[in-house]
Image (spheres, grey):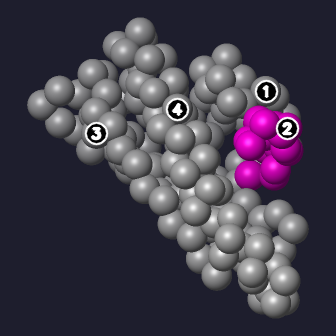
Amino acid sequence: MEQRIEVSRNIAAPPSAVWRVLTALDEAPITLRAVKAVERLDGTGYEVGTRWRETRVMFGQSATEEMQVAEADPERRTVVVAESRGARYRTVFDLTPSAGGTDLSVEFSGESGPLGAFAQLAMTLFAPLAKRATRKALEQDLADIAAAAERAG
């Protein structure tokens, strides 16, 4: 079962400033209010193959997930992937220059493996709530990225 959520926002800063904020992994706990810690596992910059553990608060709980850069096209697009408890996650950030700065969109998708009957029922019941909470978290991340990029200009 796959879930997909997309949100976007205009940021009053050039793509170069947005890219710097978006890819500054070591600064994420300062920039993104939901991120509590980042531990690098591979890589010193931001390129395909860079891996890290990210601890963030979701649904009122602290969770740590291992993330990896799967695609990086500077100032245009990046894709981050993760696997956890039988589910695969993919987050795509697209940066598009605009008259007002940069349009930043993020598409988050998650796909679980085969589910048993009880897990399928639970997913059906709780998916709308989880989707709303995830959308809200993505919107907050974009707001935090916008604030940092606009300050940096």
Whether residue 54 is visible: yes
Separation (CA) of disc 2 from disc 4: 17 Å
Q: Name the residue under label 1.
A: 36
Q: Where is residue 86 in the image (x, y as percent from the top left)?
A: 83, 74
Residues drawn in magenta:
52-67
Q: Can residue 113 be seen in this view?
A: no
Task: Please tell me whether residue 132 is drawn above or below residue 75 in the rendered image.
Answer: below
Residue 14, placed above or below residue 151: below
Residue assigned mark 4:
140
Give me the residue at 60% from left, 47% from top: 133
Q: Earlier in the sequence, mark 2 or mark 4?
A: 2
Under mark 1, the amino acid is Lys
Label 4 close to label 1 by CB (< 8 Å): no
Q: In which quarter of the image is residue 95?
A: top left
Residue 109 % position (x, y) = 57, 65
Q: Is mark 4 on a helix, strand or loop?
A: helix
